[in-house]
Amino acid sequence: MTAPLLSIRDLHLSMSSYDGKAHVLNGIDLTVNRGEIWGLVGESGCGKSLTGLSISQLLPSPPADYMAGEIMLEGRDMLKLPRPELQKLRGNRIGMIFQDPTTNLNPAFRIGDQLVDVALAAARWKPGILDCPPGAGRSERKRAARKLARDMLERVGIPDAGMRLDSYPHQFSGGMRQRVLIAMALIGRPDLLIADEPTTALDVSVQAQILKLLKGCVADYDMGVILITHNLGVVAETCSHVAVMYAGNIVESGPVAAVIERPEHPYTRALMASIPTRDTRRGMLRGLAGSVPNLITPPPGCRFAPRCPHATAACMTGVPAPVRVGRDHAAACIHAKEPETAHV
Amino acid sequence: MTDTAEHIATEPELPKQDKLQRALFRFRQSRLSMLGAVMVALVVFFTAFGTLLAPFPEHIAGGVDTAARFQPPSWAHPFGTNELGQDVLSLVMAGTTVSVLAGLSVVLIGTVIGTLVGAIAGFAGGWIDEILMRLTDLTLTIPGLILAMAVAAALGPGFTNMIIAISLSWWPGYARLVRGEVLAVREESYVNAARAIGASPSRILLRHILPNTVSPIIVKMSLDMGFAILMVAGLGFIGIGIRPPTPEWGTLLSVSRSYMPDYWWTAMAPGMAMFFAVFGFNLLGDGLRDILDPKARR
Amino acid sequence: MLQFIVRRVLLLIPVLVGLTVIMFAIARILPGDPVALAAGPNATQAEIEALTVEYGLDQPVWVQYGHYVSGLLQGDLGTSLLTRRPVAADIAAYLPATLELVFAAMAIAVLLGIPLGLVTAVWRNRWPDYLSQVAAIGAISMPRFFLGLLLQLCFAMWLAWLPLGGRLPIIVIPPPSVTGFLTIDALIAGDWTAFTTALSHLAMPAIAMSLSPLATIMRMMRSSTIEVMQQDYVMTARALGLPRRQIITKYVARNAVSATLTVIGLYFGWLLGGTVLVETVFDWPGLGLYATKAIVSQDMMPVIGVALVIGLLFVLANLVIDLLYGVINPKVRYS
């Protein structure tokens, strides 16, 4: 059996601040295979973005400190790689898309130039992406990179791609800019795409288009995707799998259908209950009482216990281990039950 | 009635004591601003006592000692003597008073004029604002030294004339700063509250707006002190500032030029004194800016 | 783009009118009797009156101003009372020297200040950075004329590596004037001796002038680089594998430079005004020296002319900076 595309094992991360050391990732386990789209959901501050940034090692250290765990990309531990090796992986093995398309493109450069630079950087380790013979001169490589940039813009649905290469970011709408950023993330043909809230800053109508585009690209390029979002609706529509995060832990994970139909962790249930549906009447919108715990002095035991309606004394001692609750479906709650074998 | 207005219009903020202590703490943390503070303290000390402490007070008043012309640095004359046999150290010590007082006058006059112009412009708005700010921009387009030179030349030499000449180009920075703060603070709720209760504009200005502009003004004044001292010395250097025998650093340096390179020491003390004083004020101002006005940290 | 330029140019007009009013007011309203000075101590009352009429000083102030402005529009900046030559001709003769000095100083300041600012920002909070911050404040605090004097003492008088002052010794035949900048004219003429001579004369005054803008540009560049490095697009560039060197020297640098440009524009005007002191130290035959000589003899027309020309150049410099800003930061152009 070949190694999975990405496998995170027991990742612990702390961030130092003036107030102390916050234990922000508390043993993350996650496995992503090609063709899978994983939704990583949770409230702000639960560590979902930090998980994404950890994978390509983009957190400055200090304040970040990886205390334990491993992040394996096809069998190689990213945490043990020297910096130049990491650099080789960014862009052509791992692509990233961030939340705000207005601030993630450099305003002072034509988007064509930005795409070409990313393509050329990726082509240093992956010459195949450029359509030119080995040993081609600089100008020839540049021309090939420009052609690739145009093709990518076309692929992400930007009309007049050839002309638009010479436009500046501010001449695009928000949705179009996000398409450019997707093209930029995919131009190096990465195997893993990490998209951090890619649609949050966009209009609802544009959101759906961008998600559809992402889904199409995954199918085309046979990638694995981690889609970080706080929106369960987005997950239900786009993802094949979902991992729910709370205060630095993955509390429940599994195939989307299973988790949404039969959420086992009380936090997942609370999250689902907070989504307004067609049947929600005015005044019935439900939030979750309490707030995310302080991660400098986290509560002992289950970190969700202080807010959990079903918490018992047992919840306060020992971090709950994931319990198998269905096929590939696990919940980190001592009250979660193994399903009867008949169900499986 | 006024009491109520005061009560309602009090700005919500940290207790004053706490704020001051925090600022002092941060100031002590910054070694450079401490160094600047010590240097400025030394400069201020010489401003007050330089003339008194000078080893050869008779030279400051214009006394000459032709027998002792151009003596190189020695224990008796650490910075040597000049073409008139005067002790250079004594002249430079006494020159501190002139330079610092001139610089301080320029900065104070500039602050007062600028604050008034800026406050009036910000408060009045409309065409008054427009005219005053155009005038401010205009003054900024004429390089300060050229304007000061022209005015100083037209008025003739002398301490007062020189201060007037420099001050004429010194206020626009403060006017812009104060106007900006007035416009920002004017819309704050506590000022509106005070106005609703019927406090007069001058009262609002004095009690509510100026206290808020104090920090950036102090920072600017400290940084400007150094540049004002340089400007005073510059005018002295080209011969249209304060005239001898009043000892002034720029004039002393200008005279020493004629005796280079053989009697190079006559230039060292005035030049280094200028550098020291300006450096001190700049270090202090820079430190103060980081502490009092973090917004402006660029 | 054209519309942007036209709008900016039209905005200059009221500024220039104001400039002439201010300078004229200083000359006419402030005390001082230029006629007596021009006529000399032995002049008779009749001679003085004749001169007064000749210069139009007997007419009301606004009439004098009207004459002055209508003259200005024909390129007439008045006549120097002392040299009896047209001020415009004098300024035309002295301006190139000043501009050459200012551009040389600015070139040193920009070419060293921008990379130094970039480097210290990358080395932020390590000892070379701290050291450079103190050195920068020191450089800003150094009086230019004292620095000039020290340079002269060291490199001209003791070491005798560089000439003491002036622009070109009389024995060297100046190259045919094309730009008015001796160094460039010498290069155009292919006259290597004239070039090295001119450069050796330019070196010290340019260095003395450049130190303070160099330090300011460096500090400005450092802080804007630090700001830009925290922008999202830098994170994206890192995440997509662009080499660190390329991110800093290309992507960060351009954004940081556009923030620094405004300071450069301001400094240009400051340098023009500040040449006076350095020109005096190095006996550099530019506008500053001309104005100083005129001022000492209360000859006001040259002073007004110089202030006007410097003010105009300052305004033009800011215009150029605005336009450059539009080129570097494309968003400005269209708003």
Image (cartoon, coloured by chain):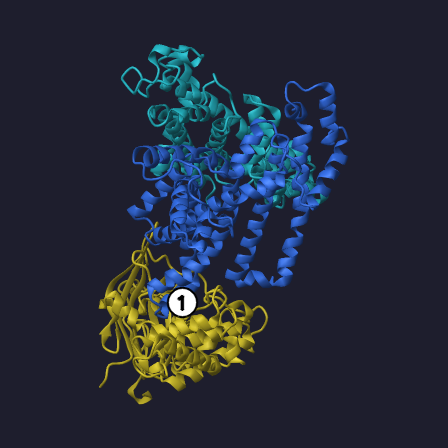
Chain colours: A yellow, B cyan, C blue
Q: Is residue A179 left or right of residue C55?
A: left
Q: Residues within 10 Å of mark 1 (few under 14, many from 20)?
A: many
Decide: is A89 above or below C219: below
Query: Which residue in the protein does label 1 denote?
Result: C236
Using the image as rendered, state which of residue C44 and residue B80 is in the foreground. C44
- Residue A267 appearing in the image: yes
* Residue beneath the point at 74% across and 24% down: C49
Question: Which element type, helix, strand or loop, lies under badge 1?
Answer: helix
Give the quarter of the image for residue B177.
Answer: top right
Residue A159: image location, x then y, percent: 54, 81
* Residue beneath the point at 33% across and 13% down: B68
- Tell me how many marks there are: 1
* Residue beneath the point at 31% across and 88% down: A344
- Residue B176 appearing in the image: no
Q: Chain of mark 1?
A: C
* Residue beneath the point at 41% across and 60% down: C252
Q: Quadrant of the N terminus of chain A?
A: bottom left
Residue A181: image location, x then y, percent: 45, 73
| Amino acid on which the number 1 mark rests in the picture | Thr
Decide: is C196 above or below A133: above
Q: Is residue C66 left or right of residue B153?
A: right
Residue C316: image location, x then y, percent: 58, 50
Decide: is A163 above or below A66: below
Residue B127: image location, x then y, percent: 72, 43
Using the image as rendered, state which of residue C165 and residue C30 is in the foreground. C165
Q: Is residue B59 left or right of residue A86?
A: right
Using the image as rendered, state which of residue B99 and residue B239 is in the foreground. B239
